[in-house]
């Protein structure tokens, strides 16, 4: 049979309904397989882009940490504290470098930025060993760190802009190699002579520093034995009465127990509260302690459409609320403003000494000043009347321990918790250097520098790092 005859025969078969259905079925299968393959490729592409985003944002965070740690190392005056800060700066630079290597940019382009991060790690490790030995930074070493900090600021600014462009879709990951060719080479410290000859020492992995929005030491370790609880153990029915009193019997429609915690150090009952003349779904959740019936946690979610209450008014409303609930001598410290609400941190004050161990958070609605939430976990765990000693060193002596380059703004006495469930009695100094605000804590009994925190003012509140 000739070719023409075969084609005519195939056409004849195709014209039959049965053969036509088979062809349609085959085309359908091919289309489905093609669509499945396309969808799978798109999923893989999306997964890859997600990995790029994660690496980039993690790297940006690590660079921000490096910048703040280098700055803090220029503030502290005790070799031991400087050693701890530089050790962490080294770790953060290593993590930044690791994430940098995951980006879809050629290593030739990343070379200078990678070298800068290596230099931060090298000089930090080298000076860390020196500081552990008790030797302070020399003027030349101080200038080296200052120079590295300047490069870190430039790199951080560039990364923030690149992040904005990526998030806004102005730059795609496929274009990043071309864009980064200029960016990463400019944001580097390839010729910094300060680190020549520095030996690359072994790196130490430490705990990642926390960003604490509501004031220093809000995340300190909770005492194994709660010191702020007094009174007898109460039943669930007894606590229900206290819940009604908390909100007001004229407002409460019903109180329903939702659970009991018998396993934590502070044993509690939890309840849902519905209110009169309000939708049933607009409820409050409140947790009360079994011992003494103290208010452990409360959250009342409602829409807050606008903000007409100032932060100063909100702070005073929160303080009066705490006083009415039995929490006296509380002073506001730091706050976070978000979605027309303010979460304000209050610390206990005894004999003109701020006790940062005894903390309570209060959430205030900025439309009408209503209290929407509170948390007293840290306060109930740590609060007690303390036997505060007379400082063994004077304010002037403590002040002499502070970096002379810092412009002092305020000073006072404070008690700060440690990671070992103990407390340090300190002078608290707030100061400014290189346009940044800091808190420095000098032990009031032995003059040792206990801690340094950087204060970051944002549109939504005050952060400490």
Image (cartoon, grey):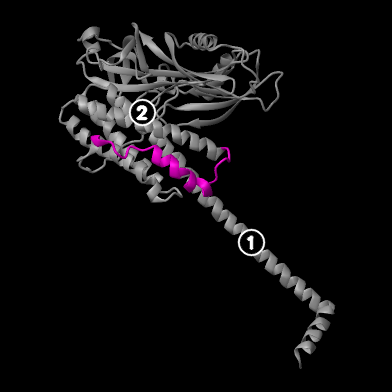
**Residue 223: image x %, image y %?**
35, 25
Badge nearest the viewer, 1 or 2? 2
Say whether residue 229 is visible: no
Quarter of the rendering containing residue 145: top left
Q: Nearer the viewer, residue 400 or 306?
A: 400
Q: Answer left or right for 240 relative to 28.
A: left
Disc 2 crowd rating (10 Å Cα; few below 14, some 14-19, many 20+) is: many
Q: Earlier in the sequence, mark 1 or mark 2?
A: 1
* Picture layout, residue 335 above or below residue 156: above
Residue depicted at x 31% and y 22%: 452
Percent coordinates x, y for residue 15 in the rendering: 84, 79
As drawn, 287 above or below 26: above
Mark on residue 36? Answer: 1
**Image: magenta residue range:** 168-194
In magenta stretch: residue 188: yes
Q: Residue at x 24, y 36 (%)?
A: 193
Q: Quadrant of the C terminus?
A: top left
Q: Secondary structure under badge 1?
A: helix
- Residue 214 in sight from this viewpoint: yes
What residue do we see at 50% from left, 11% from top? 315
Residue 68 tag number: 2
Q: Nearer the viewer, residue 133 or 183?
A: 183
Q: Is residue 293 left or right of residue 132?
A: right
* Magenta stretch holds residue 446: no
């Amino acid at each position: 049979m000739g070719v023409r005859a075969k084609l005519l025969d195939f056409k004849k078969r195709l014209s039959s309904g049965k053969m036509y259905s088979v062809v349609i079925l085959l085309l359908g299968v091919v289309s489905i397989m093609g669509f499945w393959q396309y969808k799978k490729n798109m999923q893989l592409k999306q997964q890859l882009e997600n990995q790029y985003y994660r690496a980039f944002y993690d790297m940006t965070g690590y660079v921000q940490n490096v910048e703040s740690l280098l700055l803090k190392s220029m503030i502290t005056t005790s070799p031991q504290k400087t050693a701890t800060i530089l050790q962490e700066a080294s770790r953060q630079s290593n993590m930044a470098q690791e994430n940098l290597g995951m980006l879809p940019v050629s290593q030739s382009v990343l070379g200078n930025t990678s070298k800068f991060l290596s230099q931060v790690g090298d000089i930090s490790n080298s000076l860390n060993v020196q500081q552990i030995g008790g030797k302070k930074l020399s003027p030349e070493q101080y200038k080296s760190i200052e120079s590295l900090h300047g490069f870190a600021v430039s790199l951080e600014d560039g990364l923030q802009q690149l992040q904005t462009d990526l998030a806004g879709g102005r730059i795609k990951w496929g274009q990043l190699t071309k864009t980064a060719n200029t960016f990463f080479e400019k944001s580097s410290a390839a010729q910094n002579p300060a680190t020549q000859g520095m030996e690359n020492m072994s790196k130490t992995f430490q705990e990642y520093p926390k960003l604490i929005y509501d004031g220093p030491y809000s995340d300190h370790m909770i005492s194994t034995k709660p010191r702020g609880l007094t009174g007898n153990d109460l039943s669930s029915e007894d606590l229900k009465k206290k819940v009604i009193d908390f909100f007001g019997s004229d407002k409460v429609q019903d109180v329903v127990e939702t659970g009991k915690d018998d396993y934590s150090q502070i044993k509690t009952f939890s309840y849902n509260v519905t209110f009169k003349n309000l939708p049933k779904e607009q409820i409050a959740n409140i947790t009360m302690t079994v011992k003494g019936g103290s208010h452990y946690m409360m959250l009342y979610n409602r829409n807050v459409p606008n903000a007409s209450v100032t932060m100063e008014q909100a702070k005073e409303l929160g303080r009066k609320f705490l006083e009415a609930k039995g929490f006296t001598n509380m002073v506001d410290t730091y706050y976070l403003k978000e979605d027309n609400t303010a979460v304000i941190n209050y610390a206990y004050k005894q004999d003109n000494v701020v006790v940062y161990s005894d903390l309570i958070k209060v959430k205030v609605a900025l439309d009408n000043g209503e209290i929407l939430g509170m948390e007293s976990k840290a306060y109930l765990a740590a609060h007690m009347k303390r036997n505060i000693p007379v400082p063994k060193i004077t304010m002037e002596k403590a002040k002499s321990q502070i970096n002379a380059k810092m412009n002092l703004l305020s000073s006072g006495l404070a008690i700060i918790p440690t990671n070992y469930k103990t407390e340090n009695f300190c002078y608290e100094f707030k100061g400014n250097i290189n346009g940044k605000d800091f808190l420095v804590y000098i032990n009031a009994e032995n003059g040792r520098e206990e801690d340094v925190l950087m204060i970051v003012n944002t549109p939504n509140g005050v952060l400490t790092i």
